[in-house]
Image (cartoon, grey):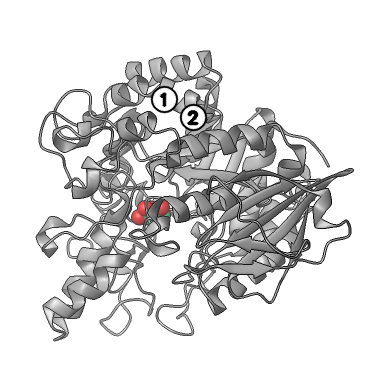
Amino acid sequence: MNKKWWKEVVVYQIYPRSFKDSNGDGIGDLQGIIEKLDYLTELGIDVLWLSPIYKSPNDDNGYDIADYQAIMDEFGTMEDFDRLLTKAHQRGLRIIMDLVINHTSDEHPWFIESRSSGDNPKRDYYIWRPPINGKEPNNWLSRFSGSAWEWDQKTGEYYLHLFSKKQPDLNWRNPRVKEEIFAIIKWWLDKGIDGFRMDVINLIGKAEGLHDSVRPGSSERWANQPLTHQILREMNQELLSKYDIMTIGETPFVNPEIGSLYVRKEREELNMIFHFEHVALPDLSGENLLKFKHIQQKWYSLINNQGWLSQYLANHDQPRPVSKYGDDREYHQQSAKLLATMLLTLPGTPFIYQGEEIGMTNVAFQAIEDYNDIRMLNQYKEEVGRGSKPAEVFKKLQPLSRDNSRTPMQWDDTANAGFTTGTPWLGVNPNYREINVRAARAKADSILHYYQQLISFRKNNWPLIYGDYIPLLEEDTRVYCYLRKYQAQLILVVLNFSGEEVSVSPELAIPLAGFKPLFGNYSLPKSCVKIDTICLLPYEARVYSS
Ligand code: NOJ
């Protein structure tokens, strides 16, 4: 197996707006991140992925960029960024940036020019079309509700926006767009950053002709097009391959066959992708656990040896994993640690999302006005507008809201969880008095310490990084069990995804007695009567080594 630093690292995603506010304006900032670098190195993190920090009107919290080479006012200045990068590098921490190049903000100077007249030189930087029979040019839908086309009265045409109407899509068929964006990428790489997470990168190339999709919401005309692969290959050959960096593409709408096209070494596109097949499952119990195992197996067998996998359970768009896949009440500690064990022992580079390491949970704010997530607010408006009962729509959308993971980081039990001395831009989860970093640091068997130990364990055990993945007990609907094998060393992982006691007897080439228990989320492994049987308590996780 070809060794690379980005295969061996543990990545931590920071959503800067909610991480740490240093100046009391209620919004996290770069200085706040600097203040927490020691916390992150103590945890064992190697790479930070920063969600967008560029100048933005924040229609979609920074995923709508108005200037790719300036820092968002609330977050600080370019000098702050340079200091952050230097201080991170001094500690051996790398930084990867979010690259959002499917769309810009409608307040980006390119779009302001583009919309100013039909013959502006920048008109073709975006995707403009005249109406067809007085209507939108095609049936495409925005990911944030409604048509993907917005009418522009002044120039009498529609522009395309696959996300909010303040996020117009760039026209990647225009060579000038490519030149401009490639120059920006080079500018950041020359600053010394360590790579990119590329936002919805598989949507950048739209199919020629912009014909109707089969169904209004289906993606076959704007996802995974040949043009996207062509651009990524050029980007790699002209730019990315010239630097020692890591790249990971966010790619919704891919299965392993389609996904592998982005990461197969010989295709020279990206190092890894984030697929969505596993996070589409509503939970990990019963049949869904089987589906999850199947997804892991499929991706592993297709990508292994040809490319590299990523592993994630959480990010700023997903609910909190302990609430979604675990039990955030009775088995909060145990199930958060169980998920950590899985994340850090499955094949692929693991990504931890801020707060996951202390078991932060979903939030249930009282009213729709307490939420900020544009996807949720648009969907709420649309469904209520169509006549659905507001209370019912609200209840349905709450557990799916992206704000579940965007509430401020819980640092301690003082006002606003120690996130800010001002008024936080989004409410703090009221459980911060119990769930916070300070409390976790003080408790020897906290979720935080468990992450710390697991991360260090992973780094000292090649099987967890470069080892083969061998699934066991594939039909078990409660227990997820697998081996990682590197040369002669075997690591056995056994995870009970149920709230009940369970016994299993995995078929192993060497007897169970030949394995020693190394790790677990309960202090005392329960003894079993039968020698080849493992007895697990609710949500118990165990790791053994041969
Ligand atoms: C994916 C990002 O993760 C999400 O937060 C954003 O809203 C969309 N892309 C649009 O940029």
Q: Is residue 297 visible?
A: yes
Q: Residue at x 41, y 50 (%)?
A: 333
Quadrant of the drawing holding the C terminus:
top right
| Picture quadrant of ligand 1 | bottom left
Q: Could you tell me which residue is drawn at 63 percent across and 52 percent down?
A: 542
Q: Position of residue 366 (x, y in %)?
A: 11, 62
**Left or right: where 454 falls relative to 216:** right
Residue 349 percent across, percent down from the top left: 62, 44
Between marks 1 and 2, how big is the CA–CA gap? Answer: 6 Å
The answer to which quarter of the image holds residue 14 is: top left
- Pick the residue in front: 429 or 47: 429
In the rendered image, the vertical position of residue 107 relative to residue 377, given as above or below = above
511 on left or right of 56: right
Residue name at image x 76 percent, y 66 percent? 506
Residue at the disc numbered 2: 43
Foreground of the two, 401 or 143: 401
Rendered-image quadrant of the N terminus: top right
Secondary structure beneath dot 1 equals helix
Does residue 158 appear in this view?
no
Circle 2 sits in a helix, a strand or a loop, which is it? helix
Task: Estimate the x, y position of residue 219 in percent, counting from the top left.
Answer: 49, 73
Write down the quadrant of residue 56 in the picture: top left
Which residue is the site of mark 1?
A: 39
Q: Are marks 1 and 2 in contact (CB under 8 Å)?
A: yes
Q: Is residue 377 left or right of residue 327?
A: left
Where residue 324 is drawn, which disc sits there? none
> Does the beta carbon at disc 1 come under 8 Å from ligand 1?
no
Q: Residue most toward the front?
A: 529
Neighbor class of circle 1 (other Cα within 10 Å; few <14, some 14-19, many 20+) is: few
Amino acid type at image mark 2: Leu
